[in-house]
Image: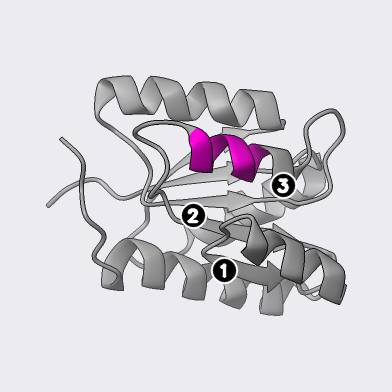
Amino acid sequence: MNTRRILLVDDNHNDLELALTALDEAPGRPEVLVASSGAAALSVLREAREAGTLPDVVLLDLKMPQMDGLAVLDAIRAEPGLQGLPVVMLTTSGEGRDIRACYAHGASGYVVKPLDFTQFREALRTIQAFWTLLNRAPRTS
């Protein structure tokens, strides 16, 4: 069985730690790659593409400095070998305009981060289970 991978992109250290804790306890325990900025996320993805170890899904924060989630999403959708990668926006914004913009830019999903840790953990486990265990995506060679 192939190793399951998630790339978690968030500039908030506390949110990263909570997400890592939640995913560490998840069934099927995926390998979690972490990037704390948009530029770092693209670097991780390019290295993974070259190594043939792309993640099954990218969990991407929307509100980040320098390069926000939409800019990262646009870069992923424009880059050869990354275009089809599932990208789920994982953000605190429940604003309709943000949701519409993310889908217009090619997001695969949009999840508002629950404030309660138990609900946050369940949301991450559900995302992880779907994208790494249930979903079957085409693989590039």
Mark 1 or 2, closer to the camera: 1
Question: Which kind of residue does numbered mark 1 sit on?
Answer: Gly
Relative vertical location of residue 55 with respect to residue 30 in this rendering, above or below? above
| Residue 58 can be seen, yes or no | yes
What residue is pinned by disc 1? 109
For the stretch drawn in magenta, what is the main secondary structure?
helix
Could you tell me residue 123's position as x and y percent? 60, 75
Q: Nearer the viewer, residue 6 or 52?
A: 52
- Identify the residue at horizontal 49%, vertical 69% (top origin): 127
What residue is pinned by disc 2? 24
Mark 3 or 2, closer to the camera: 3
Provide the residue span drawn in magenta: 72-78
The image quadrant that residue 116 belongs to is bottom right
- Identify the residue at horizontal 64%, vertical 69% (top origin): 110
Mark 1 or 3, closer to the camera: 3
Q: Say whether residue 93 is left or right of residue 106.
A: right
> What whole-number distance in Å separates the C-alpha atoms at marks 1 and 2?
22 Å
What residue is pinned by disc 3? 70
> What whole-number distance in Å separates the C-alpha atoms at marks 1 and 3?
13 Å
Relative vertical location of residue 41 with respect to residue 9 in this rendering, above or below? above
Question: Which kind of residue does numbered mark 2 sit on?
Answer: Asp
Q: Secondary structure at mark 3?
A: helix
Question: Which kind of residue does numbered mark 3 sit on?
Answer: Leu
| Residue 113 can be seen, yes or no | no
Asked if residue 24 is among those painted magenta in the image, a careful observer would answer no
Could you tell me residue 32's position as x and y percent? 47, 43
- Identify the residue at horizontal 69%, vertical 77% (top origin): 118
Could you tell me residue 22's position as x and y percent? 58, 61
| Total numbered labels | 3
Q: Secondary structure at mark 2?
A: helix
Q: Give the quarter of the figure containing the C terminus.
A: top left
